[in-house]
Amino acid sequence: MENSCFLCDKTSNVIVYEENGFESRPCPECGLLYCNPLPKEGEVDFENESHTDSFYKKPSQYKSKWLVGKIGTGKSLLEVGAGNGHLLNEFYNCGYNVAGLEPNTQRINNIREVYHLQTHQGYLESYDFKEKKFDVVYHVDLLAHFPDPLFAIQKMKDIMAKDGYISFEVGVVGGISTFWYKLFPLG
């Protein structure tokens, strides 16, 4: 059965990337890449990371300073998918009261041992934040890892303080020529 964009419910015949029997197709309405077919329950390892550690470490100082320039400092910040903690540490160095959420226990141990920062183990969708609210909820390249991205965004809104911010980074994979995928496989 053909899958459609989860935002617009439109389908596309254009395939921008293909791997292991799954296709990335751009929605003709909004441009969002969607997966066709959808993987079966348990078929995707949501903790799998195909980027090297330096992919996240190198730009972390730039990203933290960008956020400071946009909203200032002294705010509580949750990084969802904190990885090895490089960006979380940079936010801390910029004056944020930080917490991380990460499902991978090895990465959590790295954050605690190297940076000595508060990190919680779990997935955004099922983690119980109790009544805790954050001024900033931040994540990098996670939309493709959420089984239900709309639910994940709603959960971020639920834990965001009044007048808070959700800040996230996503790739623009669908906006470039398929030619580049042949030269630089996404992994």
Image (tube, helix red, strand yellow):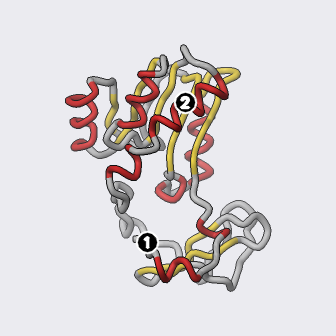
Task: Give the residue drawn at x 71%, y 71%.
Answer: 27
* Left or right, 47 with reference to 18: left
> Is 40 rendered above or below residue 129?
below
Reading the image, the residue beneath label 2 is: 65
Tell me the crowding category of disc 1: few under 14, some 14 to 19, or many 20 or more residues within 10 angstroms, Cα based.
Answer: few
Which of discs 1 and 2 lies nearer the camera? The answer is 2
Reading the image, the residue beneath label 1 is: 40
Return the residue found at the far right: 29
The percent coordinates of residue 153 (x first, y second) are 60, 44
Quadrant housing residue 4: bottom right
Q: Which mark is residue 79?
A: none
Q: Nearer the viewer, residue 5 or 108?
A: 108
Q: CA distance from mark 1 to mark 2?
A: 40 Å
Marked residue nearer the N-terminal end (1 or 2) = 1
The percent coordinates of residue 81 (x first, y second) are 42, 43
Q: Amino acid at mark 2?
A: Lys
Task: Give the residue drawn at x 57%, y 37%.
Answer: 156
> Is 177 rendered above or below residue 146?
below
Q: Nearer the viewer, residue 36 or 117?
A: 117
Q: Nearer the viewer, residue 45 or 137?
A: 137
Residue contact at pointers 1 and 2, CB within 8 angstroms: no
Task: Give the residue drawn at x 41%, y 32%.
Answer: 88
* Left or right, 6 with reference to 86: right
Instruction: Classify mark 2: helix, strand or loop.
Output: helix
Quadrant housing residue 71: top right
Q: Nearer the viewer, residue 158 or 51?
A: 51
